[in-house]
């Protein structure tokens, strides 16, 4: 009686298979580079300029045949300017539509902290008190963390984003109902430190300063004449 025995195939070696595939890929790539280099040597004109290694593609002829070390081109480091410190405060869920609150944010944008506080103090808008409190919180944070004076702070950014909109019942005529939206907004104020001496003075302000200086010099000269006449007498 003949007994058939099952023949088992040798176990599959995944490691050797991977290395074999890698060797084949390297061989194909080297042949491709060699073919490209031969084509470039036969077709390229002799007077053509060779680009630096950093600007050549991976499969270029000059890169495949070159044996020199490549050098990366790096720009010189630019010295960082003086970084002015900044503080940020956010007031969320203000019971006001973003469109109406954005008018106040636009009013204080670009002003110094004391000027922005004065503008909100005398504003007729209902939410000006909330905006003033947000600016004051930012001024307090700058004083606590960095010790910056309010006169050296400027409202760099002041913007409004859309908050939660609540849906309520809107009663209308003839027994009809609709949807009423109660809008909320988020206010963000960013104060940045600046050098008050570097701020350019307007022509009108410079004229006022010159007039005050001239008046003070005239008064000083008159006082000197009075004292001189009193001494001679």
Image (cartoon, rainbow, N blue to C red):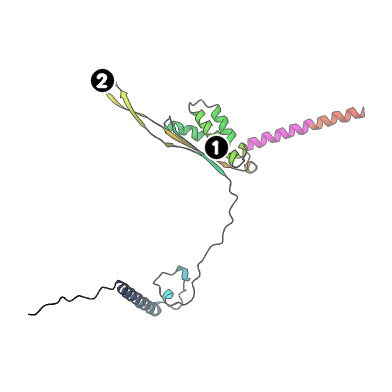
Determine the image quadrant of residue 148. top right
Gap between marks 2 and 1 measured at Cα: 49 Å
Q: Earlier in the sequence, mark 2 or mark 1?
A: 1
Residue 110 x, y percent position in the rendering: 55, 38
Tell me, yes or no, whether the highlighted magenta stretch contains residue 213.
yes
Q: Which mark is residue 204?
A: none
Decide if residue 94 is on the left or right side of residue 75: left
Residue 109 x, y percent position in the rendering: 52, 37
Report if the CB atoms under discs 2 and 1 are less than 8 Å apart.
no
When the figure is inspected, residue 55 is found, relative to residue 89, above or below; the finding is: below
Q: Quadrant of the C terminus?
A: top right
- Residue pictured at 46% horizontal, 34% vertical: 102
Residue at the far top in the pictured view: 174
Q: Which secondary structure lies at badge 1?
A: helix
Q: Which secondary structure lies at badge 2?
A: helix
Which of pointers 2 and 1 indicates the residue nearer the eye?
1
Residue at the far right in the pictured view: 233
Assess disc 1: are there few (<14), some (14-19) or many (≥20) residues with their C-alpha within 10 Å of its C-alpha: many
- Residue pictured at 74% horizontal, 31% vertical: 215
- The residue where tag 1 is placed is 138
When the figure is inspected, residue 126 is found, relative to residue 66, above or below; the finding is: above
- The residue where tag 2 is placed is 175
Decide if residue 118 is on the left or right side of residue 212: left
- The mark total stands at 2
Is residue 108 in view from this perspective? Answer: yes
For the stretch drawn in magenta, the main secondary structure is helix
When the figure is inspected, residue 84 is found, relative to residue 65, above or below; the finding is: above
First to last magenta residue range: 201-219
Is residue 111 in view from this perspective? Answer: no
- Residue pictured at 29% horizontal, 22% vertical: 172
Residue 152 x, y percent position in the rendering: 61, 40
């Amino acid at each position: 009686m003949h007994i058939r025995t099952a023949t088992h195939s040798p176990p599959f070696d995944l490691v050797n298979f991977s290395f074999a595939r890698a060797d084949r890929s390297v061989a194909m790539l080297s042949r491709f580079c060699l073919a490209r280099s031969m084509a470039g040597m036969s077709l390229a004109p002799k007077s053509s300029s060779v680009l630096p290694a950093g600007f050549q593609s991976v499969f270029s002829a000059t890169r495949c045949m070159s044996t020199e070390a490549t050098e990366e081109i790096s720009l010189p480091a630019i010295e960082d300017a003086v970084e002015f410190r900044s503080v940020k405060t956010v007031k969320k869920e203000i019971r006001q539509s973003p469109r109406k609150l954005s008018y106040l944010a636009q009013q204080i944008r670009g002003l110094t902290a004391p000027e922005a506080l004065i503008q909100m103090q005398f504003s007729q808008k209902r939410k000006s008190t909330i905006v003033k409190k947000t600016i004051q919180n930012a001024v307090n944070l700058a004083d606590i963390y960095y010790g910056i004076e309010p006169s050296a702070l400027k409202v760099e950014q002041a913007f409004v984003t859309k908050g939660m909109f609540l849906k309520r019942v809107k009663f209308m005529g003839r027994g009809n109902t609709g949807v009423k939206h109660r809008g909320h907004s988020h206010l963000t104020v960013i104060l940045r430190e600046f050098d008050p001496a570097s701020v350019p003075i307007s022509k009108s302000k410079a004229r006022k300063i010159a007039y005050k200086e001239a008046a003070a010099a005239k008064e000083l000269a008159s006082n000197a004449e009075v004292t001189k006449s009193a001494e001679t007498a």
